[in-house]
Image (spheres, grey):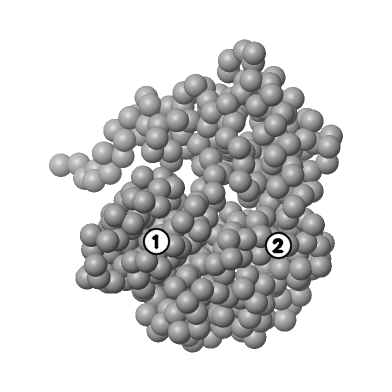
Amino acid sequence: MSYAPFDWTDDEARRRAGAGLVRTLRPRAAGTELLDLASNDYLGLSRNPEVTAAAAEAVRTWGAGATGSRLVTGTTALHAELERELAAFCGFEAALVFSSGYAANLAALTALTGRDSLIVSDAGNHASIVDGCRLSRAGITVVPHADPDAFREALKAHGGRALAVTDSVFSVDGDAAPLAGLAHVCRDTGAALVVDDAHGLGVLGEGGRGALAAAGLAGGEGVVATLTLSKSLGSQGGAVLGPARVIRHLVNTARTFIFDTGLAPAAVGAALGALRLLRREPERASRALAVAVELHRRLSAAGLTAVYPDAAVVSVRAPSAESAVRWAADCRAAGLAVGCFRPPSVPDGISRLRLTARADLTPGQIEQAVSTVLATAPRPVS
């Protein structure tokens, strides 16, 4: 009798292939001729000499790995330095660094809730928020996208300990959450507000201090921010920012902090170097925004359906999942790397190309990007 417990994966693979939803890994070379509008390197810092030098110095000083969990051997003086500077830059009392932004979201949502509490979550939230909600054991209510009134109704109906969670900037379309309205709802209902500022840090707010700073909410007693170090700061890792007592609670209760190896020193050093560079060169934030607006203006003027960018993400609609995949492949063949979002990554069923603006793009590179997207578009541009 044959033993083949994973035969079912072949059926799943055939189903994905039939639906045009096969995902593949594509290792990139160290050097490439492709113009990159697919990554999240919004400020162009991942290869900045100052940032890479900071990473190298951290390796020489602290070694290749953190060597253990943060509560054992995985916290270095460099980790503590990054946490202090990150909290001060973003306007919060304290910060805690994690191995990824995903782990930071899981920590905040599982450690700040429980079986008798409620999480109200925006329908457009990132998968890491969705998974954090599922793992929290709290009651979960998913409300329509960017609708403070829906948050209010859900929170009022609960009456107990509650938390509202949203992305600051949604990764698919690049639209911003109504943070002021959500904060007002949370104050009225006694709920905490958790905001994933992954796509706001480095782009929004004065000098790139983030969406919560821009909304005047940074440092609020009932406000917690999560973020990643892998986008605007060009490194890797994540963080939770908030009141000091919240951070102390996470140190003692967040499983993705307690039981995970600490962030590698190279990533800590790179993030700290990028943060210090951004403080000296705050114009990088406004430049990233300006590039996004210019990409949107030119693509929309040419007849494509593009969502106006509230930060650095420019979303361009495609007729179908298959055409989106083909469009992205044609762009790559023409020398341009762009993102491709399709079901199930987009629950609304609308497939898109996603272009990410970078502060270091030249006028010539912007022209190349626009021309390539238009030349490869699946429908004639009007």
Check disc 1 and report the residue beneath it: 185
Which sits in the foreground, 100 or 153?
A: 153
Residue 55 in view, yes or no? no
Mark 1 or mark 2: whose residue is earlier in sequence: 1
Which sits in the foreground, 368 or 294?
A: 294
Left or right of residue 168, residue 89 in this image = right
Residue 59 coordinates in the image, percent (x, y): 70, 74
Distance from disc 1 to disc 2, alpha carbons, whole Å, reads 25 Å
Amino acid marked by disc 2: Glu
Left or right of residue 255, residue 178 in this image = right
Left or right of residue 14, residue 232 in this image = right
Residue at the location (63% across, 48% down)?
311
Amino acid marked by disc 1: Val
Position of 301 relative to 336 (above/below): above
Left or right of residue 242, residue 292 in this image = right
The N terminus lies in quadrant: top left
Residue 232 coordinates in the image, percent (x, y): 66, 57
Which sits in the foreground, 370 or 176?
A: 176
* Element class at badge 1: helix
Check disc 2 and report the residue beneath it: 206
Residue 287 in view, yes or no? yes
The C terminus lies in quadrant: top right
Position of 371 relative to 141 (above/below): above
Residue at the location (73% across, 55% down)?
285
* Element class at badge 2: helix
